[in-house]
Amino acid sequence: MANQKVVLAYSGGLDTSVAVQWLTDKGYDVIACCLDVGEGKDLNFIQQKALQVGAVNSYVIDAKEEFAQEYALLALQARTYYEDKYPLVSALSRPLISKKLVEVAHQENATAVAHGCTGKGNDQVRFEVAIKALDPSLEVIAPVREWSWSREEEIAYAKEKNIPIPIDLDSPYSIDQNLWGRSNECGILEDPWAAPPEDAFGLTVSIENAPDQPDVIEVEFDKGVPVKIDGKHYPLSELILKLNEVAGKHGVGRIDHVENRLVGIKSREVYECPGAITLLKAHKELEDITLVKDVAHFKPLVSQKLSELIYNGLWFSPLRNALEAFVKETQQYVNGVVRVKLFKGHAIVEGRKSSNSLYDEKLATYTSDDQFDQSAAIGFIQLWGLPTEVHSTVNKQQKVKN
Amino acid sequence: MANQKVVLAYSGGLDTSVAVQWLTDKGYDVIACCLDVGEGKDLNFIQQKALQVGAVNSYVIDAKEEFAQEYALLALQARTYYEDKYPLVSALSRPLISKKLVEVAHQENATAVAHGCTGKGNDQVRFEVAIKALDPSLEVIAPVREWSWSREEEIAYAKEKNIPIPIDLDSPYSIDQNLWGRSNECGILEDPWAAPPEDAFGLTVSIENAPDQPDVIEVEFDKGVPVKIDGKHYPLSELILKLNEVAGKHGVGRIDHVENRLVGIKSREVYECPGAITLLKAHKELEDITLVKDVAHFKPLVSQKLSELIYNGLWFSPLRNALEAFVKETQQYVNGVVRVKLFKGHAIVEGRKSSNSLYDEKLATYTSDDQFDQSAAIGFIQLWGLPTEVHSTVNKQQKVKN
Amino acid sequence: MANQKVVLAYSGGLDTSVAVQWLTDKGYDVIACCLDVGEGKDLNFIQQKALQVGAVNSYVIDAKEEFAQEYALLALQARTYYEDKYPLVSALSRPLISKKLVEVAHQENATAVAHGCTGKGNDQVRFEVAIKALDPSLEVIAPVREWSWSREEEIAYAKEKNIPIPIDLDSPYSIDQNLWGRSNECGILEDPWAAPPEDAFGLTVSIENAPDQPDVIEVEFDKGVPVKIDGKHYPLSELILKLNEVAGKHGVGRIDHVENRLVGIKSREVYECPGAITLLKAHKELEDITLVKDVAHFKPLVSQKLSELIYNGLWFSPLRNALEAFVKETQQYVNGVVRVKLFKGHAIVEGRKSSNSLYDEKLATYTSDDQFDQSAAIGFIQLWGLPTEVHSTVNKQQKVKN
Amino acid sequence: MANQKVVLAYSGGLDTSVAVQWLTDKGYDVIACCLDVGEGKDLNFIQQKALQVGAVNSYVIDAKEEFAQEYALLALQARTYYEDKYPLVSALSRPLISKKLVEVAHQENATAVAHGCTGKGNDQVRFEVAIKALDPSLEVIAPVREWSWSREEEIAYAKEKNIPIPIDLDSPYSIDQNLWGRSNECGILEDPWAAPPEDAFGLTVSIENAPDQPDVIEVEFDKGVPVKIDGKHYPLSELILKLNEVAGKHGVGRIDHVENRLVGIKSREVYECPGAITLLKAHKELEDITLVKDVAHFKPLVSQKLSELIYNGLWFSPLRNALEAFVKETQQYVNGVVRVKLFKGHAIVEGRKSSNSLYDEKLATYTSDDQFDQSAAIGFIQLWGLPTEVHSTVNKQQKVKN
């Protein structure tokens, strides 16, 4: 009788390499699956390594443009910062990876899917909830959580099974990266009083080392989608990667965050999102001139809920679809150009213009061009302040009476 | 029969100087009232000038500490950024100025209060709603809105009445300042595509001119109140002013904002809030380690509503009291020290510590000290994902059936 | 030179009849326009009367189904109760009437549009903001607000101009009606301590007079749209009107509300919405079994904002479109049948079923059929309660220390 | 060596009686603790029965007034309906029972606390999170969840241990009751298409059997606290119990709810809350005339969050304190009298009056007493509609251009 098949999210690191063997020991045929979501790894090498450590098949899927269009773009348009700080790096890639794992599982008639997460992070939740949402009949296996080995035990097992030990094994950090950014945790970062050391960063230079000359770029948006830099069109994934480079060179996008994980603990994470932060700032400024106040004041509620939902692994929940429908409806007006100065860790929006701009110089100006009817303010203030005035009249009299 | 008295919010500038005369022409005795909320003006000079241009009495009131304790502090603790950008500079001082005007009016048996605002800004609303809330029986006069003169007509009137014309009359800008920051509008700033020129700024150096060496300071909070810098205690108003100086020297706190005014238009404003931004960032990081997730995730709703309410002139509304009660209740845990690096326009929190810290290295760590029960995650994920799983099962079967 | 044309929202009552003449006096050619949104008036009579009192042209437009599909349906699906009580009766018809007025204005090359509202209600805002949103170039005239006559002056003018005085002129009430309900104000209703007398109601019987036998009906929904009653299909407008009759007979849908008007005052209104309330209750119960918790818990925020926005005359604002996009996305799952018992003023949902039901008896049951994994609860509770537990541990130790 | 002690929440039913024995078998000394929160049971009998089935000590604590003042009152003032339907009956008593269990545990030097909940309800979460919040060092035991017996196995064990089998064991229902209401689930109620049968109800008569004459009562509130009925003062717990009786007699307060449990499933519950519903309706009407619009429109967000938090077992979370601070601040104005007609299942508010009433007949009236300045509306509407108008102008031109 043939073995059952499991599709494993494979990264090429020690944990998932050991997992190939461990799952094989359990009687599975392991199909490794590595997604390119813009982390800039050598994918050919990873694909081969999977086979070398025992996978029966090994997939590498370029999902960069799909990730940009379907995941990062919503994060940009909705302006999702978890806890007002973290622009959802790994939280965005997990549902896409899950989707691809399930697709491969269907293609390969696999009965199970596996991931390399531990039992205390958010990613285990994101993988498992996403997979169950996409195909509740698939079994989900979490080898690292299940084997509960110490580092030493894991290495001993790896040596016994001839699994190559990566040379950077001594790195204190745990890193994840995609085109929307890079996250880092562990090691000295676990002390929230300690400043993150320079070796914790990989996508950005320090402000100290940033150039003394700014770069000024113009980003053009079409219906909320960034489409051009300095007049040149790029596919979205390339546009983000290009900004990672340009803005990273100026030290833009370092974030140091003590955050509330879904699993009930606080953890300290360091993020680098040079492209994402540049785009998020530019997009906000364009919305500031193109959205009416009522939309601009309600959208943050949608953003916050969407941030929490994505962070909490509920991408494939119908609430995401409904919130996305809200966001997409607002983006039709978000057209125009934003001029951004990249300098010493800043992405400063210096100018914004749009054919949909609701900023009306004729109404805003204090020069003689003014078309605003100042006399209307009198009636406006009278009615605007009326509830407060009545409250005050009644309740002060009330106090006197009592 | 004696003239009726009016208390005028007096700034020493052309508009309110002309207003003294204009109100006198209308048959009022004008009592000038100038508040020191930390704008750093020569108040003696202003007090004398009021009398010189025709006021029958002239008050100067030092309200810096009251402003810091009762107004700026709430903005800090609630983290009120209007439209996620503007930390409510003028919006915070208007209710306090109104309160003092009403107090002087009561003291002087005045029947009216006057302010120098035009008919298209937010400040007219803030003054008038606040004054009506504090004493609905007082008449409110807005001379500038009422006379509707062009600049030339106003100057002609001033010359005719021997009112001194300020030497900076040609400044294109309209500036307001208090210890929480400085706002600037008009002139070239009315073009949202143009970068704000250096002469638009007064409290901060440019990043280009910021020093190449950072200052690193430690700010200590006691129940959400910043009480010490580098171990030295300051009254709140002095602490903020000191930070304005230190952080302003590093170019911290420049904000360029196209905002939605209450009166229905968008306007472009430039703000500088070096002290405020430094404190807001430090306070947030301290909350990140001391507030539980549920509080941290609901508080932004309170902040947004409070920001809008204060921006919209409703400080003396019972909703402010209720939102403030929420905020104050949360601050008892916000104790500790935050280390901030001021450098090249940044106020970077590098470290935070608190005896109320909920960050628990024993729970967060990935080292062998780990006390987190990873097996609990399995049950957690199962129930957390259950609604999505049931939804998926039902509605996919549904699609098949249809 | 030809007169300019004005399109007047014409109701057949005294105010708008006088307005025809008053506008004609001002030099306009008046085009009367009466919309049928389900108020059950004699429209032929109104159309003729408009001509009789001086209109140059008179339109009657049957907009019942458009009102039902485009306006009432959104109110149903979003469950918009203003201040948790008022299901937006007149607030829903005003934008549609405005739209039709603008269409007729375009057709007739009119330069102005007029409505019969006074200066203290919400409807003036709804008409004027809607018209300006649809065509900012049209002038809006509010004759009743402008002439500021007392009742006696208005009658004197009407007599002078041979305008027929309606026989019900002595009615103390001010009534508006459409298929979503009937509103009533004025007279004794202005005393919030007084119970509304029976003659204030027109669509419903009193509970005292309701039949002693219930009617039990089954309402079927397709994607959130009520399509059938007791298995019989109806166009939406007819379905609502039929429910008005059936539920009105049982006294369902009386509402007595002291509400906050947009113009700053509180007013006491009496509403009758037998069909609307029946549908709103049935629809909620169907959502209760078909929407996942996250959607069900966020949708009320959308509902509240949408209620306020519609109440406040901002139907034609882009925020309505965005909120509507959210709501519509959720409705695809709202299919099924709800059994409602109409009895003594109640619309009681007794049963609900759906092929999209997420209620899973196998998971919910306490019988031996139970498929819920109770052991999962242990891990769930451990992590769910962890933040509170850590907070408690830290801050109690803290209290001991201090 | 002495046995360790466990404090068991004891109800007198089969589950907790068996738990006494089961815990004793495990080597514990069991201290039974039964709280009177208004469920109207024979507490003496329960106290004795605990001893009879093996408890070493048995407490009965009258917590009715504490429950009313500290728990039910907040639910009333905050108007907490979970999912707009369920007024939080059991969810309110669980934290209080937990608190008393912990107090008894401290008094008795017990090391553990036990409850009789299964593994699929909300109550297990409420107990365990509350206990951990109050004393993280106490062990929590859930015998029923742990033993996982079928009904037959449990009865066999009971017989073997001479534990009396209750005579109502065949009741299909699972009932919990306190003075805020009664909840019922299981049996036929698990079918959401079936109407709840009459035997599912215990506090209310059916509408069919309700009297043909209404009772009209006046409820007086002092700072949001109901203090008198028809002019007679009652302690809060007695006032609620009295209303349960009077309103229950008229069939008020039956609720049939398919709700989303915290543990991820939907369940169908039937509630009866005659007193609670009467008070909630009366209180809302008093708020409608005493709270300004801004407070009235924000408070529902607080209510919803508080409802979810209490439902989800987080009473002893600092967010509850902060939300409560908000609510309490608003209640100072909620003074006055509400007249309620109890009739055929309805609690109809017919009249409301307050010395803090913001309803101003002089402003609201359409008679000649009108003091509202209708001309103010013109300026108000102009600015209120300005953003929509500018949006329309820009984006329609935009569409033409494109």
Image (spheres, coloured by chain):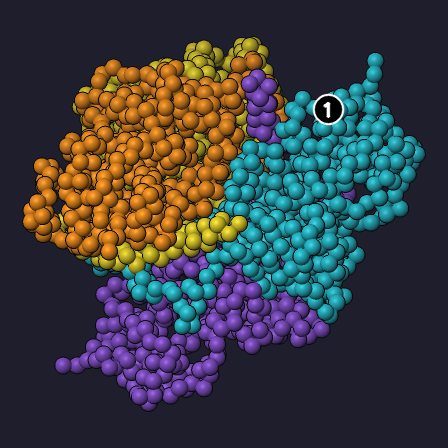
Chain colours: A yellow, B orange, C purple, D cyan
The answer to whether A24 is drawn above or below residue D352 in the figure is above
- Report the front residue among B126 and A172: B126
Dot 1 surroundings within 10 Å: few (below 14), some, or many (20 or more)? Answer: some
- Report the front residue among A369 and C94: A369
Rendered location of residue C384, percent (x, y): 60, 32
For numbered disc 1, what is the local secondary structure? helix
Residue at x 31% of width, y 50% of height: B128
Asked whether, in this view, residue D150 is left or right of residue B184, the answer is right
Asked whether, in this view, residue A245 is left or right of residue A398, the answer is left
Furthest residue in direction front, as rendered: B1
- Is residue A163 visible in the rendered image? The answer is yes
Residue at x 56% of width, y 20% of height: C398
- Report the front residue among B201 and C106: B201
The kind of residue tagged 1 is His
The answer to whether A273 is drawn above or below residue D174 in the figure is above
Point out the image quarter for the C terminus of chain B: bottom right
Rendered location of residue A188, percent (x, y): 44, 14
Point out the image quarter for the N terminus of chain B: bottom left
Q: Quadrant of residue A20?
A: top right
Rendered location of residue B241, percent (x, y): 29, 25
- Is residue C103 visible in the rendered image? The answer is no
- Report the front residue among A372 and B209: A372
Chain under disc 1: D
Q: Which residue is mark 1?
A: D106
Q: Quadrant of residue A183?
A: top left
The answer to whether D262 is drawn above or below residue D205 in the figure is above
The answer to whether C270 is drawn above or below residue A318 in the figure is below
Rendered location of residue B246, percent (x, y): 27, 21
Asked whether, in this view, residue C53 is left or right of residue D358, the answer is left
Residue at x 56% of width, y 23% of height: C395
